[in-house]
Structures are given as structure tokens and as C-alpha cells.
Amino acid sequence: MLCSPEQDAPSRINAIERSMSSTRAPAATKQQEVTIVAFGSEYENLDEVALDEGVGDFILDCARDADPPLLLVDLSNIKFFGSSFIETLFRAYNRMNERDGKFAICGLMPYCAEVIKVTHLDRMWSIFPDRGAAIKSLLGD
């Protein structure tokens, strides 16, 4: 599964959206110059099963393909995630760093925010309450 959202390529985004509706994958969109990975309500719980279904690979593909290398992971619908998902986020963050890019997370629910804080990842990752604030920061506005 490739993640290649482009503003000037709506057919590619439509193809991604069609594949996601049939295979349970997060959505990849582009707002301004920022690639956004968002999860629908069916992803309330991001556990090993979700990762086995390709969620982790999808996020890592987005980190690889984001052009420019600006990646926002919107977790607004996520109430729980496990250590394997944190590992995926960490790998995406590293992939963005290797590309001299920027990585951010927004929309953390209370439990998820607590997990990020307890693991001290809030010191490494840029965390924002919503997409607007995250996009503004990623674009350097």
C-alpha cells in the first residue's frame, strides 16, 4: 500500500481512498504542504490486530512518500494504542528525521496523551491539540 497524497493528483487520492474503504486503512490526505494520516472511528483501538492489517506499514509509507517531508498523524479518534503502535510512530519519526523533515501528532485523547507523557515522547515529538495548530507549526507560520 503506497501513501502518495498530492494536491494536484486527485485521482491518486481517490484511488487511495477507495483502497482504504475496502481494506480498513487510515486516510492519507494533504492539506497545504502537509501529509496527514488520520484514523476513522473504526480505529478507536490501535492494537496488534490493526498493525497486522497494515496500519503500521501505511504510516511508514506516508513517512517515506511525504513530499515535502512534513507528516502529521491525527489521532483524534483513537482511545487506546499499545506499545507496537508507539514503535510505529517512533519509526515514522525517525524516517522523517532521516529526510530532514518534520513529524507531529495531534488530537490525543486523555489516555493516549498520558501514555506519550509517561514515556517522555512528548519531549521528542511535537504534540498539538488539533490539526490547525499542528499544520501552522509544521509550515513554520
Image (tube, rainbow, N blue to C red):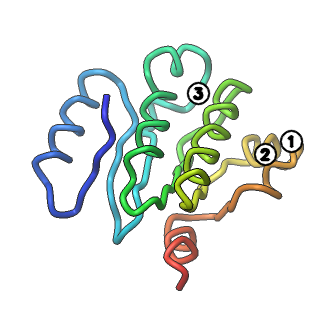
Q: Which residue, as the protein is rendered here, is positioned at the far bottom?
A: 141
Q: Please state the horizontal and vertical placement of residue 59, each as a whole percent of the image.
A: 47, 38
SS for callout 3: strand
Mark 1: secondary structure = loop
Could you give the CA–CA distance between mark 3 and mark 2, rounded to whole angstroms? 14 Å
| Front residue of 79 and 8 | 8
Q: CA distance from mark 3 to mark 1?
A: 17 Å
Which of the marked residues, 3 or 2, is nearer the chain's N terminus?
Answer: 3
Give the residue at x 33% y 59%.
30
Relative to the observer, which residue lies in front, 130 or 10?
A: 10
Q: Relative to residue 29, is residue 49 depicted above or below?
A: above
Q: Classify mark 1: residues with Cα within 10 Å, few (<14), some (14-19) or many (20+).
A: few
Which quadrant would residue 90 be assigned to in this image?
top right
Q: Position of residue 61 (x, y in %)?
A: 42, 37
Q: Position of residue 110 (x, y in %)?
A: 74, 48
Looking at the image, is mark 3 or mark 1 earlier in the sequence? 3
Mark 2: which amino acid? Ile
Q: Which amino acid type is shown beneath numbered disc 1?
A: Thr
Q: Are marks 1 and 2 in contact (CB under 8 Å)?
A: yes
- Res. 109 mark: none
Q: Which residue is mark 3?
A: 46
Q: Quadrant of residue 119?
A: top right
Q: Which residue sits at x=50%, y=14%? A: 52
Residue at the (62%, 47%) spot, across then down: 93
Badge nearest the viewer, 3 or 1: 1
On residue 119, the disc is 1
Residue 56 placement, left or right of 67:
right
Name the residue beneath numbered marker 2.
116
At label 3, the amino acid type is Leu
